């Protein structure tokens, strides 16, 4: 019999993806999404299913160990808008 991964490993990827999605969706809607992406980068890298994560000047990328790469890409027009003071 070969070594089989536990069935929950697929669920772990799905669960962690949903957590990451929630974090980065909130970051995208913040007043300064690029700054928020940078702030969240160390947190995202700590997820057990994440192989690597990085931020560019318009996007956040997450490469999963047992999956592909997912990105959150900002609209360049949104980056040109002045920040609001709250």
Image (tube, rainbow, N blue to C red):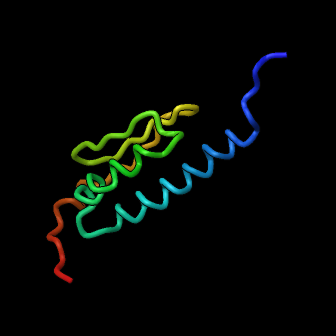
- Indicate left or right for 63 with 17 as reference: left
Q: Which of the pair 59/48 is nearer the observer?
A: 48
User: Where 81 sits versus 35, above or below?
Assistant: below
Q: Quadrant for the N terminus, please.
A: top right
Furthest-bottom residue in this view: 86
Q: In this view, does 73 lie to the left or right of 67?
A: left
Q: Is residue 72 above or below residue 77?
A: above
Q: Choose between 75 and 71: the one closer to the eye.
A: 71
Query: As rendered, which of 82 and 9 lies closer to the eye?
Result: 9
Marker count (numbered): 0
Task: Residue 75 in the image: state x and y as whole percent.
Answer: 30, 55
| Residue shown at 74% from the left, 35% from the top | 6
Residue drawn at 28 percent across, 56 percent down? 39
Residue 25 in percent (x, y) is at 43, 61
69 relative to 81, above or below = above
Side of 69 where 32 appears, left or right? left
Q: Which residue lies furthest to the top in this view?
A: 1
Quarter where residue 13 is shown: top right
Looking at the image, which residue is at 61% across and 52% down?
15
Residue at image point 16% right, 80% down: 85
Residue 21 in the image, given as x and y percentages of width and height: 49, 55
Q: In which quadrant of the rendered image does the C terminus lie?
A: bottom left
């Amino acid at each position: 019999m070969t070594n089989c991964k536990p069935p929950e490993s697929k669920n772990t990827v799905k669960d962690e993806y949903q957590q990451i999605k929630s974090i980065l969706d909130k970051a995208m809607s913040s007043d300064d999404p690029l700054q928020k992406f940078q702030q969240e980068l160390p947190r995202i890298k700590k997820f057990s299913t994440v192989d690597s994560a990085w931020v560019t000047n318009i996007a956040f990328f997450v490469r999963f160990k047992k999956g592909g790469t997912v990105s959150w890409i900002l609209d360049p027009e949104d980056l040109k808008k002045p920040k609001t003071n709250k």
